[in-house]
Amino acid sequence: MSVYMEENEVIKKNMALAQEKIYTVEDLEAFPEDVRAELIDGQLFYMATPSPTHQRLLMFLSASIWNHIRSHKGKCQVFPAPLAVYLNQDNLTYLEPDVIVVCDPDKMNQKGCHGAPDFIAEIISPSSQTRDYLLKLIKYQNAGVKEYWILDTQKQTIHVYDFADKKKGTYGFRDRIKMKTLEGLEIDFSEFPLT
């Protein structure tokens, strides 16, 4: 009886391992176009449909950055989601951050950004909190992203990570925040209507 139980446990463990599929970028690209998902180290994460508040904030942030770059004749480019970011030099990580700024044109091609953007902003949704606050924070820092903002409309907070200088700041939706990536850009979040 005990031998049977031991064999049964081994079978269960092997079945569990077999069910933990490692996905690749090629697997993700084979999904139908209406399926949005991200890939972090071979683990698949489906993305929820964004809320109207999320989309308004995405446009507010993207437009603020775009207007600054254009008015200063800057070389950097801003891209709102969805745009593919192939963060690592492998086929196990594929992300679609809410807003990215890329200052090296050699990182861009028709498929997206290959390597670390200079700036990334993620707007929190209930289903993405763990990924944005933990997994992506570590991935972005290790990949060489210089600046990472996490915007949480529910808590009305903006966490700013300056990876280059190893600094972190927390702000509210009534604050003006300087963006280190783009010199002279200060975004006044009191201009963003939360409701």
Image (spheres, rainbow, N blue to C red):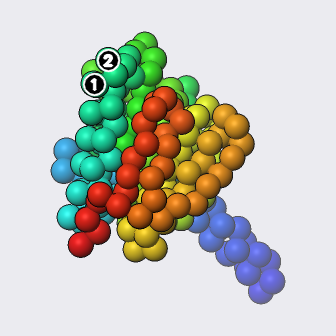
Q: Residues within 10 Å of mark 2 (few under 14, many from 20)?
A: few
- The answer to whether the residue labelled 1 contacts the one labelled 2, judged by CB atoms less than 8 Å apart, is yes
Residue type at mark 2? Lys
Query: Camera-side residue: 145 or 38?
Result: 145
Q: Quadrant of the C terminus?
A: bottom left
Q: Is residue 18 above or below residue 97?
A: below
Residue at image mark 2: 73
Question: Which residue is the site of mark 1?
Answer: 70
Query: Which secondary structure lies at badge 2?
Result: loop
Q: Is residue 133 left or right of residue 100?
A: right
Residue 5 image point, x, y percent: 73, 81
Asked if 103 appears above or below 63 in the picture, the reply is above
Please tell me which residue is depicted at 20% across the width and 64% down the height of the picture.
Answer: 52
Can residue 174 be seen? yes
Q: Residue furthest bottom?
A: 1
Left or right of 78 on screen, residue 155: right
Q: Residue at x 58, y 60 (%)?
A: 170
